Amino acid sequence: MQLYVLDLGLTPYDVAWALQKRAAAARISGALDQDLLILVQHPPVVTLGRSTKPGNLLVSPEYLASRGIELRDVERGGDVTIHEPGQLVAYPIIDLKRHKQDLHWYLRQIEEAVIVSLTSLGLACGRVAGRTGVWRERDTGNQVKLASIGVHAKDWVTSHGVALNVCNDLATFNHVVPCGLGDVQMSTVSRECAEASLPAPEFAAVERALVNAFSSVFSLRAEPVPAALAASWGEPLG
């Protein structure tokens, strides 16, 4: 089985969100005959998942708008999170009926894909018991979070996914309680490589590593999405 890959580059959140919905509908109907991985960076945006608790957004919508930061209520699971340039966002459109119909298993698979990708780049990361996402333990014993995960599924076809901090400055995170975890410390691949005295990988290298890891973890063969098929969902960048 194949894993189609579509790299949108820097794309507004609403554009990618609409594309996810069209692609998921196509996967459900069978018009999209293989699983799909959408890669994207977003301009600054705060997204509120279904489990967002009052108070986890630390500023008003008006304040965010004054800073050019969008705010969106979305259908994914999880609490509040951030997207901003320099963060690699991956939206897997995967038919779990062809894998395993278990969302907890699916979350662990996404974590594994990120862990495998970062390990391949020399950065050892892992999980924290009871907390979804991907973390790194520093020599001091502190746990820092590199990747946040929130998913949605309809008819066992997934959307939304994982945001991996690669080289973003994390400034937008100052406006929220990330993932509703008051004690969380966010970090990036670049910062943690510096902490570990490793060279920071280029953004494109992280993208390639993540695609390879998703392919391996889900036992799929990655290839670019056929242009004609992508066009059938509507113009993705229009």
Image (spheres, rainbow, N blue to C red):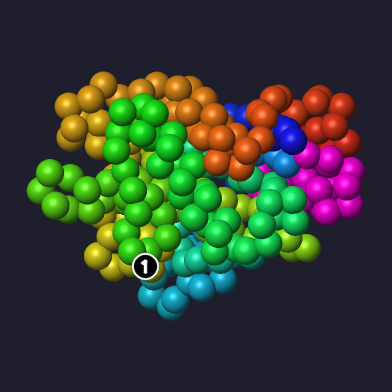
Q: Is residue 75 left or right of residue 128?
A: right
| Horizontal relation, residue 56 to residue 3: left or right | left
Compared with 61, 141 (above or below) is above
Kindly tell me whether residue 121 is visible in this rendering: yes
The residue that appears at 39% across and 29% down in the rendered structure is: 120
Q: Position of residue 10 (x, y in %)?
A: 56, 32
User: Residue 151: percent from the left, percent from the top?
Assistant: 59, 58
Give the residue drawn at x 46%, y 63%: 80
- The residue pinned by badge 1 equals 130
Pick the front one: 65 or 109: 109
Q: Nearer the viewer, residue 168 or 142?
A: 142
**Residue 203 versus residue 85 in the image, above or below:** above
Q: Can you see residue 64?
A: no
Name the image quarter holding the N terminus: top right
Q: As rendered, which of 100 and 13 lies closer to the eye?
A: 100
Specify the quadrant of the image occupied by residue 114: top left
Q: What residue is drawn where x is 73% and y is 60%?
A: 156
Q: Secondary structure at mark 1?
A: loop
* Residue 127 coordinates in the image, percent (x, y): 35, 54
Is residue 17 found inside the magenta-colored segment of the image? Answer: yes
Q: Amino acid at mark 1?
A: Gly
